[in-house]
Amino acid sequence: MIPDLSPARLHVVTGKGGTGKTTVAAALALALAAGGRSVLLVETEGRQGIAQLFDTPPLPYEERRVAVARGGGEVKALAIDVEEALLDYLDMFYNLRRAGRALRKMGAIDFATAIAPGLRDVLITGKIKEAVTRRRNGREVYDAVVVDAPPTGRITRFLGVTGEMSQLARSGPIKTQSDGVMAVLRSPQTAVHLVTILEDMPVQETTDAIAELEKAGLPIGSVVVNMAAEPVLPADALSRAAAGELSGADLSPALAAAGLPGGAALADALAAEVVEHARRWTAQDALRDQVTALGRPTVELPLLPGPMDVGCLFELAGRLEDHLRAEVGRADRGVSIAARNERGAERSAGASGGTA
């Protein structure tokens, strides 16, 4: 049996636009597939970002292999088409696929999803739940499902709208389906991961989203700090520069020794660049402290040079795999400590009972 990298089987990845959530979702799928697992990567927004990352043709509404992971695992990808998902729903619960096709030709399905945007989210989360719970020959088809979800600004609404549908429907297939979806989304087999970068707005949106998800009873996984840059100066030099204690005069001797032309003007320009870098790094470090204060498992992914390609995805996947293993190990140690404490308490209680 392949050891689990995570207790969750449904991984929902969200983040403010521009934080690289699609890249993180793709890398996470590769990490979870390592060692021979089968993972489904789901796109929900119709941007075909996953196809671009894996350099494949646009994804159809069918599960298609896009990558082979380390150790022989595979990643399949699916771009959910809302109209097709509605046809699936009509067929599954009402045996109305043929009628649904007629409605689509009339434009009724597109009209319905346009005037009721919540319906779109209900259909998407229903398809995701079906993929998570699908079984073949007595076992789950996928070891994990990773969702490139909507951004943090609407993630709670996206995941919770099916619960609202359940409250409106008192009985019947709609309520049964809605309850089943929410049972998966609110269970320990789901984890909502939040992607941020070390800038004010993304960190604030991450903080707000965590509070909203907690209030909605949705399980939160890790915070992924993406595109984290490394400092180019030692710690003491960073401190001096950030405090404005570095000038062109400090750099001139080194520039002269290196035989670089430009004199004082070049030294002053370089000093200004160094001060700007140091202050930017200091500000990022303060934001890093804010992320840590959220109290969630956190992993940093580096800012990689050049355009993102499959090789970069595998590099990020390796870091995420290390993070997942560390979290599983931490959880196992916590369970072991709790079990030892419980056994100790039982022995103490037994001893007390014996001397009474």
Image: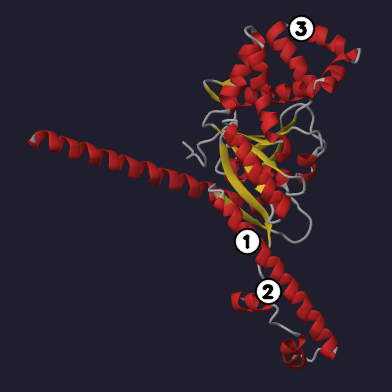
Q: Secondary structure at mark 2?
A: helix
Quarter of the figure with the C terminus: top left
Q: Is residue 244 above or below residue 30?
A: below
Q: CA distance from mark 2 to mark 3?
A: 66 Å
Residue that numbered label 3 is attached to: 96
Locate residue 314, reporting x and y percent.
Answer: 66, 51
* Residue 88 locus on image (x, y percent): 73, 16
Q: Is residue 111 left or right of residue 321?
A: right
Q: Earlier in the sequence, mark 2 or mark 3?
A: 3
Label 3: few (<14), some or many (≥20) within 10 Å?
some
What amino acid type should be assigned to the residue bearing mark 2?
Ala
Q: Is residue 150 visible?
A: no
- Give amino acid for label 3: Leu
Give the tally of numbered discs.
Answer: 3
Residue 62 picture location, percent across and down:
74, 27
Crowd rating for badge 1 (residues with CA inside 10 Å; few <14, some 14–19, many 20+): few
In this view, the residue farthest toward the right is 106
As helix, strand or loop, the secondary structure at mark 3 comes to loop
Which of disc 2 and disc 1 is earlier in sequence? 2
Callout 2 environment at 10 Å: few (<14), some (14 to 19), or many (20+)? many
Q: Who is closer to the viewer here, 73 or 47?
A: 47
Q: Which residue is mark 1?
A: 286
For residue 328, above or below residue 158: below
Amino acid type indicated by mark 1? Ala
Dot placed on the residue nearer the N-terminal end, 3 or 1: 3
Return the residue at label 2: 242
